Image: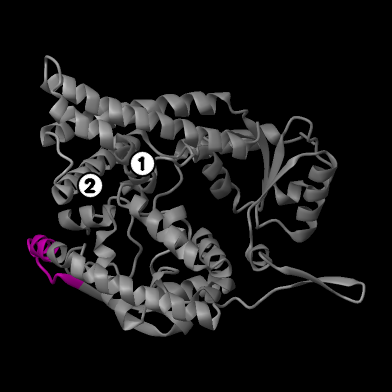
């Protein structure tokens, strides 16, 4: 079975099982409340509405990310999302009951069913995940990269514990000069750090022996995306449009930004007041205002809730926050975990300095450093910085700047209004993924040791 078909079957099984689990949880709650026969006057409204309840409950679970198939989600996160999903479903049902007046059964049933539903959904997801990934064939992959990038790339494969990839060979680019033996591998992963000459050699070998290719994209690969084929006489060529949004797209994006930021600020006023009170339990102001670099390299004043102690960089100077940073306050820790410290940037969006979706704005000191190391970094300033972005939903806070840049450029190259909507919906999942906000951390020593073992065992296998 092809991988895409397998993933589709995986999602269908999860959805069907969740519908059963959600409704079974309510039925058990009914039986626990009414030890004898359940009164028809209480049960009939639910029997009439269960299809609608099932539909929006599954939608809520989907928005929270329970139907992803990456295999990277921890059990704690799955349980947390299942619980929050059932809470959200119960709140929507209660609101529906209140406004319609015609749909009523004991609210205690909804409250009592939450843990039952969450537990059943959690167990179902674990069972399907274990069976599904157990049936998938493990793909044996050869990794080729420049010596300085091997550990970083290899650690990504090894960290994806449930993705069915096994690195069997690891080669420095300089080692690939002859013809390697591909008999015992299913595919080759080629990092962007590999030279064009070696990359072409590997691609030809893979194609000639029917092996799969895993290409980690570089700048030129992203620029070539969506290129149009054309010809001059009998000379074929690809037309590549400029890396910028069209005038029409800019107008649509701005109108959407203004409408959503206005509505968002009105809705968030009570939340802002509560958070402000909590932040004031530690010395310092409520808001933290910092200069960032916006579209075209122009600076602007970014607003966010203060999450660190006052004058946190007085002694250290500008530094990136690391995992377990002692400068983060107890309030800031929770705000960062859910990315709620960024909400005041709705004001920046309304002013036109930012957009809802785009590359995250950086400080000038880091921009200067990144431009020296990565000249292509300047292209992310083709659009306004965003409150959220593709790099934030695909990666996390500690994702390497080069990988974040690839996502930013992919977003600019593939921009559409629908893509913005998808990213905003996926951002909601970040609220239920605290690990996404963890600071920078080094590669685990055990992972490095395992990578070294693969390197040693690969020597001479050509």
Residue 344, image quadrant: bottom left
- Local secondary structure at mark 2: helix
Q: Would you place residue 333 above or below residue 211 in this image?
A: below
Provide the residue span drawn in magenta: 273-287
Q: Is residue 365 above or below residue 83?
A: below
- Of the image marks 2 and 1, the number of the one nearer the N terminus: 1
Spatial distance from mark 2 to mark 1, Cα to Cα? Answer: 12 Å
135 and 7: which is toward the camera: 7
Q: Kindly identify the residue that appears in the image at 38 percent across and 56 percent down.
A: 425
User: Hey, which residue is sitting farthest top in the picture?
Assistant: 36
Q: Residue at x 75, y 46 (%)?
A: 175
The answer, for residue 304, to whether it is visible in the render is no
Residue matched to label 2: 92
- 284 relative position to 230: left or right: left
Q: Is residue 283 magenta?
A: yes
Task: Identify whether 136 is placed above or below 51.
Answer: above
Residue of label 1 = 55
Which numbered tag is attached to residue 126? none
From the top left corner, tell me how far across and down residue 157 is, in percent: 55, 41
Q: Position of residue 180 (x, y in %)?
A: 80, 39
């Amino acid at each position: 079975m092809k991988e895409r078909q397998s993933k589709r079957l995986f999602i269908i099984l999860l959805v069907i099982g969740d519908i059963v689990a959600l409704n079974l949880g309510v039925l058990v709650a009914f039986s626990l409340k009414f030890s004898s026969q359940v009164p028809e006057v209480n049960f009939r409204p639910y029997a009439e509405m269960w299809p609608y309840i099932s539909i929006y409950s599954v939608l809520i679970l989907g928005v929270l990310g329970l139907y992803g198939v990456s295999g990277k989600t921890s059990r704690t996160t799955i349980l947390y999302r299942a619980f929050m999903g059932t809470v959200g479903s119960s709140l929507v049902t209660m609101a529906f009951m209140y406004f319609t007046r015609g749909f009523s059964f004991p609210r205690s049933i909804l409250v009592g069913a939450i843990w039952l539903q969450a537990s059943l959904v959690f167990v179902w997801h674990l069972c399907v995940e274990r069976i599904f990934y157990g049936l998938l064939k493990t793909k044996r992959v050869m990794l080729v990269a420049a010596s300085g990038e091997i550990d970083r790339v290899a650690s990504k494969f090894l960290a994806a514990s449930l993705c069915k990839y096994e690195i069997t060979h690891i080669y420095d680019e300089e080692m690939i000069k002859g013809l390697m033996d591909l008999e015992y591998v299913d595919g080759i992963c080629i990092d962007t750090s590999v030279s064009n000459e070696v990359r072409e050699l590997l691609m030809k070998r893979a194609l000639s022996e029917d092996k799969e290719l895993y290409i980690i994209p570089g700048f030129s690969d992203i620029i070539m995306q969506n290129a149009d084929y054309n010809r001059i006489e009998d000379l074929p060529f690809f037309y590549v449009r400029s890396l910028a949004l069209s005038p029409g797209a800019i107008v649509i994006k701005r109108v959407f930004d203004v409408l959503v930021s206005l509505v968002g600020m009105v809705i968030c006023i009570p939340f802002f007041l509560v958070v402000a009170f909590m932040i004031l339990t530690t010395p310092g102001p409520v808001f933290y205002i910092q200069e960032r670099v916006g579209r075209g390299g122009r600076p602007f004043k970014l607003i966010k809730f203060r999450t660190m102690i006052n004058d946190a960089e007085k002694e250290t100077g500008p530094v990136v926050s690391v995992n377990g940073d002692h400068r983060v306050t107890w309030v800031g820790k929770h705000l960062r975990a859910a990315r709620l410290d960024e909400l005041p940037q709705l004001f920046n969006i309304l002013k036109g300095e930012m957009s809802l979706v785009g590359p995250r704005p950086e400080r000038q000191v880091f921009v200067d450093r990144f431009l020296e190391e990565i000249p292509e970094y300047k292209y992310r300033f083709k659009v306004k910085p965003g409150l959220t972005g593709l790099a934030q939903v695909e990666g996390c806070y500690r994702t390497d700047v080069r990988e974040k840049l690839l996502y930013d450029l992919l977003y600019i190259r593939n921009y559409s209004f629908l893509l913005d909507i998808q990213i905003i919906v996926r951002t909601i999942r970040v609220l239920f993924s605290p690990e996404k906000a963890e600071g920078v951390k080094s590669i685990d020593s055990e992972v490095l040791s395992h990578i070294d073992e693969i390197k040693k065992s690969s020597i001479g296998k050509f």
